[in-house]
Amino acid sequence: MTYHRLKHHPERRIHKRVPVLTSLLEPITIKAPQLHIDNPIPGFMGNLSAGGMQIATFVALPVNVELEISVNMPGFHNVHFKGKAKRVFQKQGSFLITFNFTHISPEVREHITRMAEDFEMCYDRRILGVTDVCYGHKCFYFTLCTEDCKK
């Protein structure tokens, strides 16, 4: 029997990410002042970190365009982020945009960091077979969690 060793690639991201697309159905509003688009562009978050997010939208946006994003998220209403589109991928009639924050409040950044840490801890414990993994409402990821173990 041959065992294949998985190549370990060091994590290059500074901030841990949280998956949100299936859990956070709140739409986001995107404005691109540089492009002189009058109406806000609708979209959804695919994942979120303290450094940025992935956005799904039906409008192609150029790389490096400055964006302003508004979203409701657990613990915060009408949060505003500013940043730049760093990567844009077309996928089956929609576009996935990697967005890096240039402006985010320290309070929101800390909250997102705690959500990502709690998500990762829960995920790791479930992978290891721990059965009592949920900390309930003490968990910053709790409102987004869709796992069966949720208390």
Image: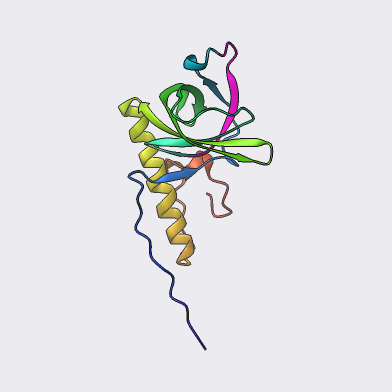
Q: Nearer the viewer, residue 61 or 135?
A: 61
Q: Is residue 104 left or right of residue 61?
A: left
Residue 111 lies in what quarter of the image?
Answer: top left
Q: How is the image coloured?
A: rainbow
In the rendered image, the vertical position of residue 146 relative to residue 73, given as above or below: below
Whole-percent x and y of residue 94? Answer: 65, 35
Whole-percent x and y of residue 67? Answer: 46, 23
Q: Is residue 1 left or right of residue 92?
A: left
Please, which residue is most extreme toward the right here? Answer: 93
Magenta region includes residue 35 = no
Q: Nearer the viewer, residue 63 or 84?
A: 63
In the rendered image, the vertical position of residue 62 relative to residue 135, given as above or below: above
The region drawn magenta spans 37-47
Whole-percent x and y of residue 44? Answer: 58, 32
Residue 110 lies in what quarter of the image?
Answer: top left
Q: Residue at x 35, y 27 (%)?
A: 102
Name the dominant secondary structure of the magenta segment.
strand
Q: Say if residue 111 shows up in the picture.
A: yes
Q: Is residue 99 left or right of residue 106?
A: right
Q: Nearer the viewer, residue 24 or 84?
A: 84
Whole-percent x and y of residue 13? Answer: 36, 47
Please, which residue is most extreme toward the bottom here? Answer: 1
Q: Residue at x 41, y 41 (%)?
A: 115
Q: Residue at x 33, y 28 (%)?
A: 107
Q: Residue at x 45, y 23 (%)?
A: 79
Q: Is residue 52 left or right of residue 110?
A: right
Q: Say if residue 138 shows up in the picture.
A: no
Magenta region includes residue 42 = yes
Q: How many marks?
A: 0
Q: Nearer the viewer, residue 44 or 123?
A: 44
